[in-house]
Amino acid sequence: PLLLTADWLIRVTDMSLRICLSPADPAAFQRPPAIPGLFSDKAVRLAKHRLLTADGGAEAGDAEDDEARELLRRFDPDWLAELAAPGLSTADRSLLTAMLFCDPFEVRFWLLCRRFLPQSADPSAELEAGWDSLSPHPVYRRWQARRLACLLGRRRRLSPQQTQRLVECLVLFGQLDKAVQLLLETEPAS
């Protein structure tokens, strides 16, 4: 549990509240942290909209508008200046906004979009492992070769099903010698 005490310290304690592990002085923070989860959903969406649009979005003039302005005020000015840079593509602006709001799904989505959208596509860039099936053939083969090398390195600890799958993958990749060697090294009971 975290406790905010009367002396304005944040303390981390054990479950019985008897052992205090780390006092932190909130005065050490120069500005309040930007934590979108502490604001209403409408205010967060409005703040995202303002960051994503070049004109800053329409002024709503209600409580959510004040909350959105407060949230934007709490963000690091360097990030906001980078978002306001001219010539920033939509994918780049959206990626920076997703990173600013700590949204892992949006970050992965916009990384994928940046990879495949024509204005920002870099054919030499590799996608992360979760998106490898969308990669060009040579990149996909390179990923699979890395996985096979990793599995071959720990082949002694593989279950019989994993060993069989590894042998099948080696055969599919044309590495028949390694597949035969693996089968010869495998215990007959497995």
Image (cartoon, rainbow, N blue to C red):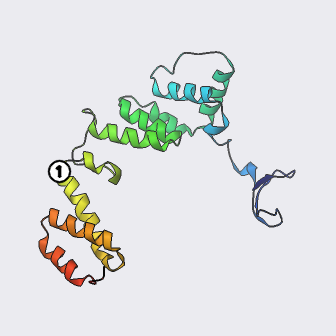
> Which quadrant would the N terminus be assigned to in this image?
bottom right
In percent of the image, x 22 and y 64: which residue is there?
145
Q: Residues within 10 Å of mark 1 (few under 14, many from 20)?
A: few
Which residue is the site of mark 1? 137
- Res 88 → quadrant: top left
Task: Note whether 183 is above or below 51 in the view shown.
Answer: below
Residue 148 in picture, x, y percent from top left: 26, 67
Q: Nearer the viewer, residue 39 or 171?
A: 171
Q: Is residue 93 left or right of residue 132?
A: right
In percent of the image, x 26 and y 66: which residue is there?
165
Task: Note whether 182 is above or below 52 in the view shown.
Answer: below
- Dot 1 falls on a residue whose secondary structure is helix
Q: Of the residues shown, which amino acid type is indicated by label 1? A: His
Q: Is residue 188 left or right of residue 16?
A: left
Residue 94 in picture, x, y percent from top left: 42, 33
> Which quadrant would the C terminus be assigned to in this image?
bottom left
In percent of the image, x 50 and y 41: which residue is there?
103
Residue 49 in picture, x, y percent from top left: 51, 25
